[in-house]
Amino acid sequence: MKVKLLNLMLLFTVIFTMNSCSSDSSEETADSVSAVVVENYTYSEVELETMKLINDYRVSIGLNPLEKINHISFKSEEHDYYMIDKKAPSHDGFVDRSNNIMKLLGATTVAENVAFNYNSPEAAVKAWLNSAGHKANIVGNYTHFGISIRQDAATGKKYYTNIFARID
């Protein structure tokens, strides 16, 4: 029963997040699925600022701040590079990322926000908060998160992947 409920919740999360992508202007390969927890991740100032904005918002409405996990940021980074390669924002491969985080970190629920072509953390977070689906992820019953923001060298456009997880 628990497995069926978990699978149903995962399906709902996938459907919910697939309908909530941001922009203001396929699947990943098996090689990109980490079999071990990635412990090292170097955060840029922009990534740290985005995480702070999300946590500041959560705290302002009485929710717990989220703890960052390097492995989740690594999975986010992999997805950013996938989107840069495809030249489009997407949630392709979300089930694989989610399953990886559940298996390796013990997460019970995983959700994802992506954004494309925002020039500042404030703009991306504002857009997410103005979107019902993205806001639901930001204010959801999560305990941890990770983020990656990468810029396409050819176009200069930024790709954001923000993954949320509940780890009890």
Image: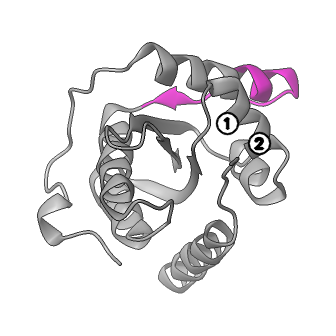
Q: Is residue 69 magenta?
A: no
Q: Give the percent coordinates (x, y) of residue 64.
A: 70, 28
Q: Residue at x 43, y 36 (%)?
A: 156
Q: Is residue 15 above or below residue 132?
A: below
Image: magenta residue range: 56-68
Which residue is tagged 2?
127
Residue occupying the far front of the picture? 154
- Disc ID at residue 124: 1
Q: Is residue 123 above or below residue 107?
A: above
Q: Residue at x 58, y 38 (%)?
A: 143
In the rendered image, the quadrant that contains the N terminus is bottom right
Q: Residue at x 30, y 50 (%)?
A: 81
**Residue 97 occupies quadrant:** bottom left
> Which amino acid does the dot numbered 2 rest on?
Ala
- Circles 1 and 2, Cβ within 8 Å, touching? The answer is yes
**Residue 12 occupies quadrant:** bottom right
Q: Residue at x 54, y 59 (%)?
A: 109
Q: Which of these two is toward me, 144 or 129?
A: 129
- Which element is circle 2 on? helix
In-image side of 2 versus 78 (left or right): right
